[in-house]
Image (tube, coloured by chain):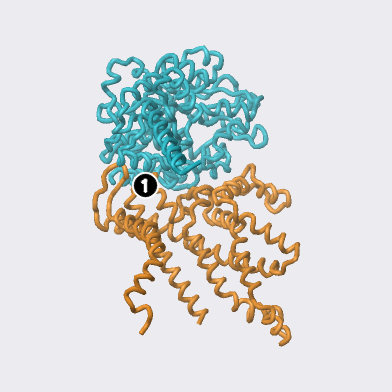
Chain colours: A orange, B cyan
Amino acid sequence: MSIYSTRSNRLTGLLYLAPALAFVAAFTAWPLGQMLWVSLNSWSLITPPKFIGLNNFTKAFNDKQFWVSLGFTLKYTLLITPILMIGGYAIALLTVKNTPLRRFTRAVVFVPVVIGLGASSLLWYWLFSTDYGFVNRLLLDFGLIDKAVIWLGVDADRSNWAIIVSVVWKVLGFGMILFVAAIQAIPPEVSEAAMVDGASPWQRLTQVTLPLTLRTVLLVTLISVIGSLLAFDQFYIMTAGQPQNLTATSVFYVYLNSFPYLKLGYGAALSLILAVIILVFTIIQMLLTRRSHA
Amino acid sequence: MNLKKLTMGAVAMATLLAAMPMSAWAEDLQMWERSGGNAGMVDALVAAWNEKNPDRKIVLTYIPHTEMVPKLAQSIASGEVPDLMGLDLIYGPQFEAAGQLEDITSYFADDASIKTASPGHMKVSTYDGKLYGVPLYADVSALFWNKDLFKKAGLDPEVPPKSLAEIHDFAKKITGVEEGAYGYYLAGNCAGCNIFTFGPLIWASGGTIEPADAAAEPLTGDAVPKVLEWARMMHKEGLINPANQAENGETFHLQFGSGKVGMMGTGNFNITLAREQNPNMNFGITLLPGLEAGQTASFAGGDIVTVPKGSKRVADAVDFMKFILSDEVQVEVYAKMLNMTTRGDMVDNKYYAEEPLIKDVAKAIDIGVTPYTLKFFELINSPQGPWLQMLQRVYYTDDPIDTIMADAKQQMKDIAAE
């Protein structure tokens, strides 16, 4: 008979869990329930809410702009994630040994991580400025372009790539630091054994290092994907969704509806749809993690 | 110190701390104002009031612009409302229609100052024939022209354009007169900049933009397609810097001061700014024209001050409103700080006399238009709204103007009907 089967043990266990449960109930379950309730109402915040059932969800499925925004967000996520993963991993491999120069390099790459995304977006907005920006000046001086390029708000793909550059600069160090920790955690004798067996550097990377750091890779992928699906600040500041709303992300659209448009119910419905999509990605990642563990 | 003394001391301290702010709150008026507006002006108005009214001072709190609506809604729900609330004037009708503001009509029944207050502000402060607010400060748009570039282009620097056709002709001569110089300026990615500076070109020409309600027709008047055609022509002929396409408002205020723009619709705030940026530049200010000579208009923006429903200090709050509309404050606070007076009849004052440019731009107060709609942001100000989408298609595509207008009308109607 298990010790957990007795009533008093169960109560004791529950007591230990109570603070965590209370926290989750107050700060996750209750707001989620509230959001679900709000999504079933038409509510401008300054007028009383009016119950409209699933109308907000029906409207969302017929809202072309929402799907355009979601499509753009997915595209952004698909483009930036491999760059962050491969770039972060490559820098981690190059700086994994603890020499002064490598430590310094790690610090330099990591510094932008501690800057707020809003501040860094504003910084890059100015760097990409057509008339005053450093980027155009540099490219012109090196003769790589003939005339100043309008990076933001004119061409959706160009804007997207400009923002990707800014975000990669900002967050690359985060993945790198996790990868460095994961690689350093590999027992040295494992790599040494591979070397004794005559494995080439590429073989050691693909056959030893990568498999042993796969969980971290999946974790960083998940964080990167969720962060990208929730992208807001950089697009709000650098393109404001332009041109023609082609660079408006899903969260930007949720924000617009919830606050400036005062459609709290509709914004809540859009948020829930977005949450479900992110949940799907999370479940996939968890399944992959479980498989890698097995 | 023994425990008893310690406890007594703590109780006494707590009582004192609790009593002090309560007595202060009981006498002070609480005022909320959005951040991101003209904080310097509001600070000065409150300081002037506090100096004259030490027994009922105003405590001013700035609320982030985007949080103003939810914060106010929460305060109304909890019954803890401020006594005065500065509100971006575009939100006026929305709050008035929702019944969230105090009706102050009777307080101003015999007040003459209200009759000359900025018409744009007064329009959005009035709902269903009742008055809910008065102007707190005003920003108006006007046409700024660079006299140095005019001279270089062989134009008379003292004669501004009087119609859109003249803007076109002048811009043609100015563009390229020196490296990087363009005749005119239009922001390509900023809805707010365009309603502020391009909207008046339509209004002056006799057109309308937003629908006031679900039943009204947006974008009416023969002038609208003509003004849009004019804007397209200005772009097609290269009279506007292509880089302006990326302008989302961040650098809008810096453009005229760069000295590279011949003519530009901008606001009163740009006078000081342009002088700081480019002290040697000579420039003039006139009203934004329409298609025909003599047609003029302006956008009257800024804030109104209102009393939220539930305030227990309505009479005191109204006194503050009357105070800021008084002759003395109009001259000694607004005009002295070289801000717009919120009453059109106060433009002739000693401070403006010393600064002719302010006087020129102040003429816009009387003709200032403020769109009246319950969905201003969604219709006009939003970067994703039909107004900016329409203008971007006009400026940067070859789509037929009729089609663009038809699409914009439909989108505006859909939004208004929700």
Disc 1 marks a residue whose amino acid type is Asp
Point out residue B295 in the picture as x, y percentages from the top left corner: 42, 24
Q: Is residue B58 above or below residue A220?
A: above
Residue at which label 1 appears: B407
Image quarter for residue A5?
Answer: bottom left
Query: Viewed as shown, does residue A245 lie left or right of A187?
Result: left
The answer to whether residue A165 is seen in the rendering is yes
Nearest to the observer: residue B418 or residue A183 = A183
The answer to whether residue B163 is seen in the rendering is no
In the rendered image, the residue lying farthest to the bottom is A197
Give me the chain letter of mark 1. Answer: B
In the rendered image, the residue lying farthest to the right is A100
Query: Viewed as shown, does residue B100 lie left or right of A260?
Result: left
Point out residue A129 in the picture as x, y percentages from the top left corner: 61, 45
Point out residue B124 in the picture as x, y percentages from the top left corner: 34, 30
Query: Viewed as shown, does residue A131 lie left or right of B4?
Result: right
Residue depicted at 36% across the width and 28% down the height? B26
Residue depicted at 41% across the width and 69% down the height? A280
Secondary structure under tag 1 reads helix
Point out residue B43 in the picture as x, y percentages from the top left corner: 48, 27
Residue depicted at 72% across the width and 59% down the height? A104
Image quarter for residue A163?
Answer: bottom right
Nearest to the observer: residue B307 or residue A123 = B307
Image quarter for residue A158?
Answer: bottom right
Q: How many marks?
A: 1
In the rendered image, the residue lying farthest to the front is B2
Using a 10 Å C-alpha cutoff, classify the residue at mark 1 as few (fewer than 14 neighbours), some (14 to 19) or many (20 or more): some
